[in-house]
Amino acid sequence: MPTREPVSAYVAVGANLGDASASVNKALHDLGNLPQTLVSAVSGLYRSAPYQAEGPAFINAVAHIQTRLTAPDLLLALQAMEKQAGRVRLHVNAPRTLDLDILFYGDAKVHSSWLTVPHPRWMERAFVLLPLQELAPRKVIPVMLHAVAEQLIEKSS
């Protein structure tokens, strides 16, 4: 059976329950433990007010990975990580112990009932754009940053 070539993917990581910084850092580390996956780079951590969500401030980051997992298999692995971190999906935009979203999976465009890539709202969220800009500055153009300028976000120490 031939091996799949690695795909360059970007994953958004966030949390706003419990020790959110520790949860995000653990998830960034654990991404490298996924089968056939290597973490190439991670952004700094950002603290942001909830945007289209509830609860306390979020800690967010973005990871750039190389993976041989298919996009659906990567999504399943990320959901397993969320579950292991204690995520309970009470309702849309509920506070969460861990949130992992595939932002990009190579140049793929996926539209299914349970997976959309690129992520449909990545351009609307400062907590995605600022950390993504650290890793992939060509993906984030100034007009995108201007559009999210009112969202409260700061680099976390």
Image: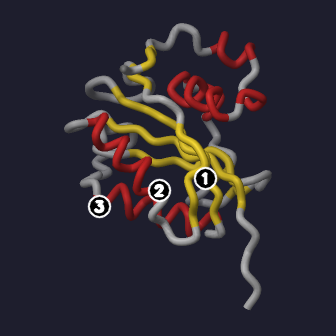
Q: Tell me the residue that label 1 is attached to.
A: 65
Do tag 3 and tag 2 residues touch (Cβ < 8 Å)?
no
Q: Residue at (46%, 48%) from the top-left corner?
A: 100
- Which residue ends up furthest to the left in the rendered image? 18
Q: Tell me the residue that label 2 is attached to.
A: 31
Spatial CA span between label 1 and label 2: 8 Å
Element assignment for label 3? helix
**Measured along the vertical axis of the image, is residue 141 above or below residue 93?**
above
Which is nearer the eye, 82 or 42?
42
Q: Amino acid at mark 1?
A: Ile
Q: Residue at (56%, 69%) from the top-left corner?
A: 73
Do tag 1 and tag 3 residues touch (Cβ < 8 Å)?
no
Q: Amino acid at mark 3?
A: Gln
Q: Residue at (45%, 64%) from the top-left corner?
A: 33
- Badge 3 or badge 2: first in the primary sequence: 2
Q: How many C-alpha atoms fall within 10 Å of the one at disc 2: few (<14), some, or many (≥20)? A: some
Picture coordinates of residue 90, whole percent (x, y): 28, 48
Spatial CA span between label 1 and label 3: 20 Å
Q: Amino acid at mark 2?
A: Leu
Q: Tell me the residue that label 3 is attached to.
A: 84
Q: Is residue 10 left or right of residue 26?
A: right
**Measured along the vertical axis of the image, is residue 63 above or below residue 78?**
above
